[in-house]
Image: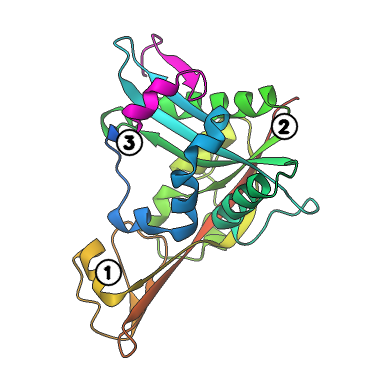
Amino acid sequence: MVGVDLEIVTLAERPELMDTFWDMETSWPEFMKHDPIGNGYYASLEEFTEYVLVCLDETGRMVAKAHSVPFRLDGDELPDAGWDAAIRSGLLTRLWREEPNACSAVEIAIEPGLQGSGLSGRIVAALRDNAARLGHAELVAPVRPNGKTDVDEPMADYAFRTRADGLPVDPWLRVHVRAGGRIDRVAARSMVIPGTVEEWRDWTGLPFDRTGPVHVPGALAPVMCDAEHGTAVYVEPNVWVRHPTGA
């Protein structure tokens, strides 16, 4: 387990951390850094500093960070477009100066050397508590089940598989359920990453020279390549989890 000498602050409380915010090493596959909707959020991070957490060790070094976004949810059903939908709505809510009525997790990134140390559960709880502090009765999360990269089955089946103890088989879903979350539904098109075949070759090192599905390491679903037209699109399913905050 990770030590207790950690400080978790918002980026609003410590704005000087923005100078080194992007320096922390992460383990995301390269292609994951090219979602056009997500990049709009990261480019507008100054708008959401109250919703961004930074975890510092006893030396003041950043060892984890967590992003969330306030957005508008129509009705109670969480959208099929998952991650992209929450971010798009959050950006438009700020642009139009509307009042958000929901809060979604966006990303939790932990220094690779500390993954598996128990820090992830603490960060999820901190993100939930921050949502409560900001007046949200619930934190929703379009979770990326990282164990799915090794399993060839539909997300609709994988997301609800459990172990003998009743907890999800997927490690990230298990973290969320242990932190008090409830699996709600699959977001079938949570993240859409389009690109040319040249871009996908650069991101993955794969040839992308034939039309059809391409299995990319780190992806939760095949990337669909249209070699004749020179494009490829990745549509990633995620799993919505609801965390009541008590606010």
Of the 4 image quadrants, the one containing the N terminus is top left
Real-space CA distance between mark 3 and mark 2, rounded to the nearest whole angstrom: 27 Å
Q: Residue furthest right?
A: 75
In percent of width and height, residue 179 lies at 58, 29
Residue 6 in magenta stretch: yes
Residue 2 in which image quadrant: top left
Range drawn in magenta: 1-21
Point out the tag, 3 or 1, that comes first from the N-terminus: 3
Which residue is under mark 3?
Answer: 22
Task: Judge by depth and name the residue closer to the eye, 194 or 221.
Answer: 194
| Left-right relation of 140 to 66 | right
When the figure is inspected, residue 220 is found, relative to residue 173, above or below; the finding is: below
Q: Nearer the viewer, residue 57 or 125?
A: 57
Q: Earlier in the sequence, mark 3 or mark 2?
A: 3
Label 2 sits on residue: 136
Residue at image position (41%, 65%) is: 152
Residue that appears at 33% across and 28% down:
19
Give amino acid for label 1.
Glu
Furthest residue toward front: 96
Residue 195 visible in the shown view: yes
Q: Are marks 3 and 1 in contact (CB under 8 Å)?
A: no
Query: Mark 3, residues whose alpha carbon is within 10 Å: few (<14), some, or many (≥20)?
Result: few
